[in-house]
C-alpha cells in the first residue's frame, strides 16, 4: 500500500489557516492526504478581541479557547493540528522552535507547504512565520543536519492570501478551485466565534477568486483560493 | 473521435521559436497536438548577418532562405508554420495584420499560447510581438468581433526565455522538462546556419534550466525550458 | 457666485465608469460639482456579449443600446456624458481624437481626473485610455497649444480599480468612502443589463474596500472605492 | 474642552527628526498639537564625527552633547522629546524597549506617526527604527496586550525622506507645504553643530520638494517635505 | 592620427540636453570628443511659456528662438547640434524620422548615447524620445539595414535625470563628476531665457548629486550628474 | 613604495567565493592586490552532502575537510582566507562576530567588497552574510566606533551571482572579463570534491556571461562574472 501523502500548513496564529487555506486543506484531506497544521502561536493577544472583552479573562483561558476553536476547525477540515505556543504580538521564534519545525518537516516529508505572504504591514507575525517556515524547510534539506535522518526533498511553497493583498505585495499566481469543499470551509469559519466579523469577508474573498478563476480558465468555478508561488513550477504540462 | 488539440506560438522572427520554445513544440507535437507557429517577420534584417555578408545578396533571397530554414526547423519539431512578412528591424504590425492573427486564434482555438518576453532592450520587435499576440487574443475573445464565429476561451499565455533574461525583467515561473525531445530541438537548431554561434549558447541554457528544474523538484531533469506566466494558473492541484 | 467645480472621468468603454468610479461621481455630483464622463468607445464589441446573442443584431444597434444604457447610468449618478466613438477591441485613438479630449480639459478645467489602471493584460483598451487621458492632460497644460486659451493647471489623476487588481499591478492608495451614495451606484449598475453577471461582483468589491477602509482608519465605512495616485498628493495636512 | 491631539515621531538617532520631519513637527505644534519625538539612539557613534575629533572625548560626553542639541532642536520646533538610549551603529532594540515604545503609543494615542524609510543601504539603524515603530504600533492595537488599557486606533504612518532617496527605494507620495514654519526648521538645523555640512544640503532638499509641490498642484509653495505612505489614505475627498 | 571619438545625445526638446546632460557633454568635448546633440523637437509648445506670452507670437518665431537658444547652449558646451522638428506636445516620430536617426548612428558610430528616462508621467515626449533613441540604435546594429554600410557596435546608453526622478522610476546608477566644467554648464543654462525658473533648480540638482557622489566614493566632488544604465557595464575593473 | 591595495570577499560558506567570485579574486591577486576571503561558516551542514555520506563522519571532520579545501582553493586564486565558524544551516552571527568583521574592514581598508545577493529563497545564510557584510562596513565608517582607529572610506559593494539568479531578484549590472584567469578559477573549482556536480554548472555560467559581455560591448570575451552594485558608481568616465 502506498504511503499516505502529506501536506504541511504553517500558520502564525491559530485561526489563519482557516480563512486563508481551509479550502486547500479540506480538498487534500478529502483526497486521502494527511494534512498537518502547525500553529506557531494561539493568536492570544492580537486576534482575540472578543474574548478579552469578557470580564476576568486570563491569558491561559484565551489560549485554551483559541486552541479548542482551532482544533475544532481542523477537525471539520479533516486536518491534524499542532501548537507551538511561541507567543503572539509579538511572535518570537527561538532556534529551538525552529529546529522543532525542522523535525516536523523531516517526519512528514510533505509534498507541499502552505504559509503566509512575505510582507504584511498590518501583522508582523505573518511574515515571520513565513520566514521560519522557509528557513526550517531549507535546514531540513541539509545532509549535515541530523545526518542519520532522511533529508527533505524540494516541496513547493505556496503563500496564501493576506487580508489586504495589494498592501502585502501578494499576487494570486495560482487559483485553486475549492467549490467542492466550500461547505466545510464555511463551517470551519463558523467555529471562530471570536472573529465573526470575518465570516462574510472571507466568503466574499472566495467568491471573487472564483469569478477570477472562471475568467482565467473558461471553466465555471464558484469558490477559489489564491496562492502565490515561491519557487518555479516544475512540470511536464503547459495545459 | 476527439478533435485534435492546438497550441499556438507567436514568434517575432523566423528563428525565435526554435531557440526559445522548440522543446515545448516538439513535446506537444509528439503528444498528438497540432502546433502552429506564426512568424510575424522573417528576421531578414536583424538576424541574418551571415547571409548579408554573401556578395550580391538581396532582401528577397534573404527572406526566402530564412523561410526555408524556418520551415525545415518546424518540420523537425513537428509543427505547422505560417509567415506574415510584417517587416523586420523594425517590425510593424498594421491592424490588418492584427486581425489576421485574430483569425488564426479563432480558427485554431489554441489551448495555450507561447510568445516573447514583455520587455527586451536588445530587440524591440520581441515585445511588440508579445503585445500583438496578446491584443489579438483579447479581440478573439470578444463576442462583437465577427459575431457569427465562435469566440476564443481563455488560453494561458507563456512567455519564453529571452537572450539575456535578467535585462528583460523575465523570470522563469515554469520549468518544462524537455529531455525526451532534446535531440529534436538540437537538430532544429542546426538548420539555423545563419546563427551557428547560438547553438552552444542555447544548449547551455537548456542544461542550466535542467539543473534548476531538478533542484526545484527533486526529480532528475537534464534539459528544460523556462516560461513566465501572464495569467494566474487555474488548477485543482497544488502538487 | 462661485464657478461650479468640475471633475472629469475618462472611460474606455461606456460602462467602465459605473463599476469603477460610480461612487466618486455620485459623491461629487451630490456636492454640487459638474461631473463629466468621456467614453472613448461604446464597448460595442468586447463588452456586449448579451446583445450580440440576439438574432439580427447590428453594430449600430449595439452602439445605440450601449449609449442609452450609459446615459441612463450617468443620469442616475448625476453626471454629464459624452461619447467619442473611437472603436472597440481594438480601441484606436487618432491625434484628432486626442486633441478633442485636450479641448475637453481646456473647457472644463477639472479639479481631478479619474481613469483606468496603467496595465491590464485582460483588456488593452483600458491602459490605452489611461495613456490618452494623461497625454491630453499634459498637452492641455502647454502654453503653446492654442496659446489664446487658458492652460490647464495640474489636476491630480486617480486610477480606478480594474477587474483583477493584482494582475494589473494596481494598488489602492486612496480608499474613498462612498456609503452615502451607494444606492445610486447600485441603481446605476442595474442599468447595465448586458453585464448582469457583474452586479454582485462589484457589490462585493465595494464591501471589501469598505472593510479595508475601516481597518485603515478606525472609522466605520461600509462601501468604498479604491484609487491609485499617479502624482504625489500636495497637502497641508497629514491627518 | 477638546483633548489635545498627538503626533508621534520615531527617530533612529537624535538628529534625524530635524532634517527629515522638522517641518511637519513645527507645523503641527503651531496648530496646537502635542508632538512627541522618540529617539531610539543618540547617534553617538555614527553621526558625531565632529565631536569624536575633539581630544579626550568620551562616549558619555558625546551622548550628553547630542541629547542637549536634540532637546534644543525639539524646543525650537515646539516638540517634546524622549530618549531610549538603545545604542548606535549598531542600534539594537530589545523586546523591553519595544514594549516601552508600545506604552508610548498607548499613552499618546497619536493621530499619525512619522518615521524612516523601509530600506537604507547607508544606514542599517534607519530601517530597524521603522520596523520597530511599526511593530510597536501593531502591538498597541492588540486587545490582548495589557487588556485593561485602551487600544490604539489605526494612525497612518508616513515615512520621511532619507539622505539618498532613490537608493532607499523611497518615493515622495505626499508633499507637505512647510513654508510657514521654514524659519523654525532652519533654526533647529543650526543647533546641529556636529553636522554643519548638512545644513545647506537639507535646505536644498526643502527647496526642490517645494518646486515639485508647486508643479504637482499649481500652487506657489516654496519649501516642502516629502513623505511616503505605508497604508492607503482613507478619505472622503479626492480634491 | 586617431579618429575623433563620438558621443551622441538624443534630446526630446531643444533645452533638455542642457539641464540634464550639459556636464557630460562639456566634459567629453573638453577631452577632444565630438559630441552631437539631436533634438527631436524644438519644444515649441510645451516648454516655451514665456515666449508665448509675448503678443503676436507665432509658431515659426518660437521655433526659431528655441533653435537659436539651443544652438548657443551647444556652442558653449562645445557640441554640434541637429534639429529634427518632429513636433511637440505631442512629439510624433515617423519611421522616416526613425531611419534618419539610424543614419546618424551609422555616421557617427558613437561610443555612448545619452537620452531621457524610460518613464515620465509629466512629459510623454521624453519616454518616446528614449524609445526612438533605442530603437534606432538597434536598427543601426542590424546587418540587413543598408547592408553596404558598417554596422553599429554596442554603445552603452545612459539615461539622464528627469525633473522629478522618483516619479519617473529613475535611479542614479552612475554619478559623473562634472565639477571641472560646471561653469560652462551654468553658462549654457543661462541662454535658456524662456526657462529662467529652472536655473536654480538644476544648480541644486548638481550640488545634491555632488554631495551624494562624495558620500559614495570618499572623494570631494562638488557638482555631479546622475545617469541610469540601460545595459550592464562591461569592464575589467571593479575599483 | 605604494601600500598594497586590498579587496575583501565575505562568503557565507567556505566554497561560495570560488564559484561566484573566483575570477575577480584571481584577477586582482594577479594585479598585485591582497585579496582576503572571510568565510562566516564552513558550510559544514548544508553544502557537504558527499562528506556526510561517508561512514563515521563527524562535524569536526567535515569542518576540517571543508577548511582544507577552501584554503587550497584560496591558494590557487592567490587569496588569503579567514574562517569565523559562525555555524551553518542556520548561520547565526552574534554582535561579537559582527564586530570582528568590522575589525577586518578597519585593518584591511578594502577598495571594494564582494558578497552575496540580497535575497535567496534557497539559502537563508546567503542574504544574512550580505546583511552582515554591509552592516559591518557601515559600522567601520563610524567615527565613534573605536575612535582611535582610522575609519573606513566608502568601498563599493558588488553582489556576486547566486545559483538561480532570477529567483533571487539579482541582476548582472557589471560583467567582469575573467578570461585571463579562467584556468585558475577552474582549478580552484576542482578542489571542491564535495560539490563536483557544480563544476560544469559554473563553467557554463561563466561562458554565458562571457557571451553576454561580448554582446554588450562589441569585445570578444570568453568568460565573465556578473555582479550587481549596491551603490551608484562614482566616476569621471562614461565610456
Image (cartoon, coloured by chain):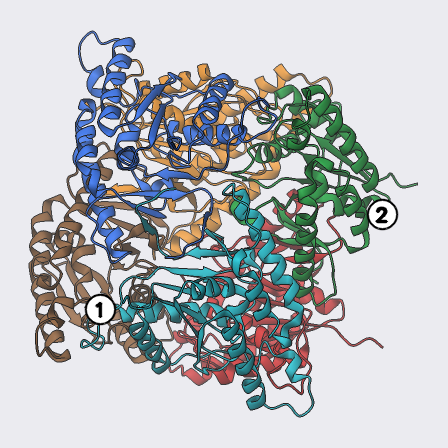
Chain colours: A blue, B cyan, C brown, D orange, E red, F green
Q: Give the spatial CA distance, label 1 vs label 2.
A: 65 Å
Q: At which x and y percent is residue E132? A: 51, 73
Relative horizontal placement of residue E135, taking residue A227 as reference (left or right): right
Residue D211 vertical position relative to residue F47 in the rendered view, above or below: below
Residue at disc 2, secondary structure:
loop
Q: Which residue is mark 1?
A: C46
Q: At which x and y percent is residue B124? A: 51, 70
Q: At which x and y percent is residue B1? A: 27, 67
Q: Which residue is mark 2?
A: F31
Which one is nearer the viewer's eye here, B149 or D133? B149
Q: How many marks?
A: 2
> Outermost residue toward the right?
F1
Query: What is the chain letter for disc 2?
Result: F
Relative horizontal placement of residue B220, taking residue F180 as reference (left or right): left
Relative horizontal placement of residue B184, taking residue D233 as reference (left or right): right
Query: What is the chain letter for disc 1?
Result: C
Residue at disc 1, secondary structure:
loop
Q: Quadrant of residue C133?
A: bottom left
CB-based contact (under 8 Å), mark 1 and mark 2: no
Q: Quadrant of the N terminus of chain C?
A: bottom left
| Callouts 1 and 2 in the same chain | no
Circle 1 crowding by C-alpha within 10 Å: few under 14, some 14–19, many from 20: many
Task: State the residue at coordinates (19%, 60%).
Answer: C17
Q: Quadrant of residue D158?
A: top left
- Asked whether the viewer can see residue C85, the reply is yes
Residue D219 vertical position relative to residue B190 in the rendered view, above or below: above
Circle 2 crowding by C-alpha within 10 Å: few under 14, some 14–19, many from 20: few
Q: At which x and y percent is residue D215? A: 39, 57
Which one is nearer the viewer's eye here, A91 or D167? A91
Amino acid at each position: 500500500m502506498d504511503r499516505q501523502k502529506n501536506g504541511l500548513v504553517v500558520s502564525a496564529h491559530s485561526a489563519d489557516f482557516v480563512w486563508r487555506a481551509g479550502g486547500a486543506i479540506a480538498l487534500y484531506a478529502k483526497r486521502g492526504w494527511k494534512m498537518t497544521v502547525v500553529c506557531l502561536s494561539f493568536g492570544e493577544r492580537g486576534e482575540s478581541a472578543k474574548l478579552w472583552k469578557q470580564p476576568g479573562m486570563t491569558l491561559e483561558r484565551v489560549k485554551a479557547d483559541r486552541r479548542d476553536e482551532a482544533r475544532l476547525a481542523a477537525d471539520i477540515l479533516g486536518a491534524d493540528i499542532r501548537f507551538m505556543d511561541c507567543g503572539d504580538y509579538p511572535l518570537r521564534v527561538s532556534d529551538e522552535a525552529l529546529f522543532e519545525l525542522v523535525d516536523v518537516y523531516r517526519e512528514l516529508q510533505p509534498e507541499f507547504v502552505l504559509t503566509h505572504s512575505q510582507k504584511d504591514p498590518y501583522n508582523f507575525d505573518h511574515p515571520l512565520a513565513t520566514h521560519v517556515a522557509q528557513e526550517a524547510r531549507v535546514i531540513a534539506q541539509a545532509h549535515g543536519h541530523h545526518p542519520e535522518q532522511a533529508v527533505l526533498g524540494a516541496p513547493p511553497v505556496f503563500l496564501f492570501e493576506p487580508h489586504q493583498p495589494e498592501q502585502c505585495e501578494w499576487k494570486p499566481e495560482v487559483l485553486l478551485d475549492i467549490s467542492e469543499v466550500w461547505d466545510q470551509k464555511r463551517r470551519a469559519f463558523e467555529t471562530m466565534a471570536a472573529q465573526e466579523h470575518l465570516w462574510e469577508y472571507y466568503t466574499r474573498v472566495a467568491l471573487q477568486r472564483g469569478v477570477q478563476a472562471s475568467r482565467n480558465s473558461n471553466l465555471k468555478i464558484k469558490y477559489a483560493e489564491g496562492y502565490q508561488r515561491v519557487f518555479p513550477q516544475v512540470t511536464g504540462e503547459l495545459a
